Amino acid sequence: MKDAPGGGGGRVLVAEGLVKRYGEVLAVDHVGFEAMPGEVLGLLGGNGAGKTTTIAMLLGLLIPDEGRITVLGHDMATDRFAALGRMNFSSPYVSLPHRLSVRENLTVYGHLYGVKGLARRIAALADELDLGPFLDRPAGQLSAGQKTRAALAKALINTPSVLLLDEPTASLDPDTADTVRGWLERYRDETGATIILASHNMAEVERLCSDVVMLKQGRVVDRGSPAALIGRYGREDMEQVFLDIARGTGVAAGGGA
Amino acid sequence: MSGSARRVWGLIYRHLALYRRSWPRLIELAYWPVLQMCIWGFVSEFMVRSSGWAAAASGVLIGAVLLWEVCLRSQMGFAISFLEEVWSRNLGNLFVTPIRPWELVAGLISMSILRMAAGIIPAILLAWVLYAFAITDMGFAVIAFFILLMAMGWAVALAVTAMVLRHGAGAEALAWSVLFGLAPLSAVFYPVAILPAWLQPVALAIPATHVFEGMRAALLEGRFASGHLLAAAALDIVWLGLAAWLFASVFRLARRQGLLLNVGE
């Protein structure tokens, strides 16, 4: 299958045989997957399963010990800057500078990503994500929900073709989390962007993900759509499938954990 | 504006926005250079009134204080601008943008120049108003002194930044302490000949030593010490090359060990 240089009909993201060791600890063990345009791919697993390490490798923050990553047709080992301009990410583990207002933060990242018509883009994001009431407030003075929306606006400032989200609705109340999920669905539908989502919220995974990669101790232990995984494990929802895989108690029909 | 220039401007804008919102940071920029100028300026005034020889040397002392601050403020301006990203746990966001490492360094150098100017200009004016010391007394060489000392400051800051990347915020004390440690060897307030013979080769391997020898030649003898300035320029190139190599090596190591996500901890 052909890789998509511009996020066209082929594979947008390809990870092959990724291995990452931290000293004696094997954090990621020959992980491989691919993502298509408009797909929301879930990376699932318990704490220490290798999700964050995998995302860091996809973003070029971390060099794999083995394996290869191609994003939008660019090899991340040799040509990552060409891909990074069309990628973005959001994570609760990194934050926006606290003393800068949301507008200033978005202006900084708009410049870093070379966004054209930056003032218009910020106004559009403020409107869509309802940032208006706190757009000129320092990021450090925002509530958890407002911070998440500001971080999401930063992740969308360059209208990325590939969006990586690590726990995008962590610490949000159900109402705000639902709004954010709805917004992500609309963004995917309108732009055809590929979204890689790491989450511990199984309802979120069922709603957003078209495909799920299940990780355990750094290895891919199963993969499929949420419906397929639920059926394969003979369960009622992804929460139960997750527990089966994490605890090693479930047996998938025809393979898997 | 080209892509690179836009990214460098993005970094500068980030820091200017920070200073606009933080008056203690703004005050800190000028506080130490002005304080140093007050202390050493009054010491010089005392020397002028109590000793004939010291009268000739007093301008040298004030000039030394000013020029040393140029080096110190350049180094701290670079290193602290990087530390601001560490303190705000923003490196993870920064390094997944298309910004190249050299563009990051260019942004930090730009901030270093702005911070240095914000600190030094009030000190220069103070020296002129209180002690009738005009920095232009050094002649056109003063431009070379500034450039050579800023370059040394950037080299030290690049090495400090590499250590912060490698060891996290725990290494941040280096941003304040490294140049203070080099000051006794840099012949800032006395000629290098005052140092013990075995220590002089070490002192002469520091770019600032040659700048201050050149400054004394300009102020006391009215001559342009081109040999010292050329030596300082050559040493700056070596120091910057070594620091750039160290930074690039540590940046690669940080990408191998995942330090870019955790460097604020």
Image (cartoon, rainbow, N blue to C red):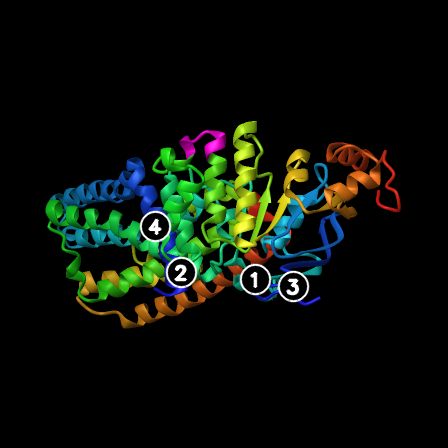
In the image, which disc is placed on residue A10? 3
Expressed as whole percent of the image width and height from the top left, the position of residue B160 reads 47, 51
Is disc 4 surrounded by few (<14), some (14 to 19) or many (20+) residues within 10 Å? few
Q: Are marks 4 and 2 on the same chain?
A: no
Nearer the observer, B248 or B243: B248
Q: Is residue B263 magenta?
A: no
Q: Image quadrant for the N terminus of chain B?
A: bottom left
Badge 4 element: helix
Callouts 4 and 3 close, C-beta under 8 Å: no
| Mark in front: 4 vs 1 | 4
Residue B17 in view:
yes
Is residue A142 a member of the stretch shown in magenta? Answer: yes
Calculate the distance from the C-alpha at mark 4 to the C-alpha at mark 2. Answer: 47 Å
| Residue A119 badge | 4
Corner quadrant of residue B137: bottom left
Q: Choose mark 3 or mark 2, whichever is in front.
A: 3
Please identify, in this view, whether the residue under mark 1 or under mark 2 is nearer the observer. Answer: 1
Crowd band around label 2 with a 10 angstrom C-alpha radius: few (<14), some (14–19), many (20+): many
Check disc 1 and report the residue beneath it: A80
Judge left or right: residue B122 versus residue B129.
right
Q: Amino acid at mark 3?
A: Gly
Q: Disc 1 vs disc 2: Cβ atoms closer than 8 Å?
A: no
Residue B206's disc is 2
Segment tinted magenta in the rendering: A140-146
